[in-house]
Each structure stands twice: as C-alpha cells, then as structure tokens.
C-alpha cells in the first residue's frame, strides 16, 4: 500500500490549502450551491462510519446541510489529524457552473487556525 505524505509533517508545515468538493451530484446536493457564496463558512465533519471509507470528511453548510466530501487523497491524512484533536475549518472560495460536478465548489481549509 502506498502511504501519502502528510503535508503538515513537511518543513514549513502546510496549514492551509484549497480543494474541490466531491459528491455534489448525489441527492441533488449541487442545488445547495445556489445559496452559498465566496467567503461563506463551511463545516467539516468526520464521518468514520461511512461505508465508502472510514476517513470520510463531510463538507456541510453553516446550517449543517451536507454538500459533499473532501477528496479521499486529502481525507486520508486530514482525518487522522482531526481525530487527534486538530481543528480544521473551511470556507467557500468559488462556486462554478458549466463544469463537472466535482469541480463546481472550491473551498479553502485551515488547520489549527489561530
């Protein structure tokens, strides 16, 4: 098994990054994009009982409606950080249309914001 490097263990410790949100096409979640805008806060919630993978991290609106999930390539190292007590907060960077669902929402994540 290939283990992805944890960016927070690297020199300079990456504490913020941007990513897309996956799963918008399920349950018509993409319709929630009409009500969110750049700068809006989002909630990242661990979902260890997820049938797809125990490292799942939900992306929710401020009112806790599930929009989708952090991509697995990120959740594999971010989930253990969150489980060990590190705080991860997110906000909307950009909402796009006329592109594949998995590219429509771009978020920024801050780890242990100060």
Image: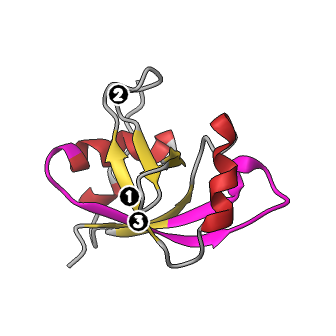
Numbered marks: total: 3
Mark 1 surroundings: few (<14), some (14-19) or many (≥20) residues within 10 A: many
> Which residue position is annotated with label 3?
90
Mark 2: secondary structure: loop
- For this orientation, the residue located farthest to the right is 98
Depicted 75 relative to depicted 64: above or below: above
Q: Quadrant of the C terminus?
A: bottom left
Residue under the image location 57 percent in, 77 percent down: 38
Q: Position of residue 92 (x, y in %)?
A: 53, 70
**Magenta-tinted stretch:** 83-107
Depicted 78 relative to depicted 39: above or below: above
Mark 1: secondary structure: strand
Describe residue 50's horizontal placement relative to residue 102 as left or right.
left
Q: Position of residue 32 (x, y in %)?
A: 62, 55
Task: Please state which of residues 5 and 86 is positioned toward the viewer in this rendering.
Answer: 86
Q: Position of residue 42 (x, y in %)?
A: 43, 63
> Which residue position is annotated with label 1?
43
Q: CA distance from mark 1 to mark 2?
A: 18 Å
Of badges 3 and 1, nearer the viewer stands: 1
> Is there a contact, CB below 8 Å, between mark 2 and mark 3?
no
Of labels 2 and 3, earlier in sequence is 2
Q: CA distance from mark 2 to mark 3?
A: 20 Å
Residue under the image location 65 percent in, 60 percent down: 33
> Is there a contact, CB below 8 Å, between mark 3 and mark 1?
yes
Q: Is residue 86 magenta?
A: yes
Task: Please state which of residues 91 and 30 is positioned toward the viewer in this rendering.
Answer: 30
Describe residue 100's horizontal placement relative to residue 28 as left or right.
right
Of labels 3 and 1, earlier in sequence is 1
Depicted 46 relative to depicted 40: above or below: above
> Which residue position is annotated with label 2?
54
Q: Position of residue 97 (x, y in %)?
A: 79, 62
């Amino acid at each position: 098994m290939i283990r992805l490097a944890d960016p927070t263990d690297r020199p300079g410790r990456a504490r913020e990054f941007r990513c897309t949100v996956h799963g918008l096409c399920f349950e018509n979640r993409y319709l929630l994009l009409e009500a969110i805008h750049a700068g809006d806060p989002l909630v990242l919630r661990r979902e260890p009982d997820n049938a797809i993978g125990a490292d799942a991290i939900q992306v929710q609106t401020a009112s806790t409606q599930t929009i989708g999930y952090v991509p697995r390539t990120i959740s594999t190292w971010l989930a253990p950080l969150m489980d060990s007590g590190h705080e991860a907060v997110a906000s909307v960077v950009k909402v796009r249309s006329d592109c594949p669902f998995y590219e429509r929402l771009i978020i920024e994540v801050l780890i242990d914001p100060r």
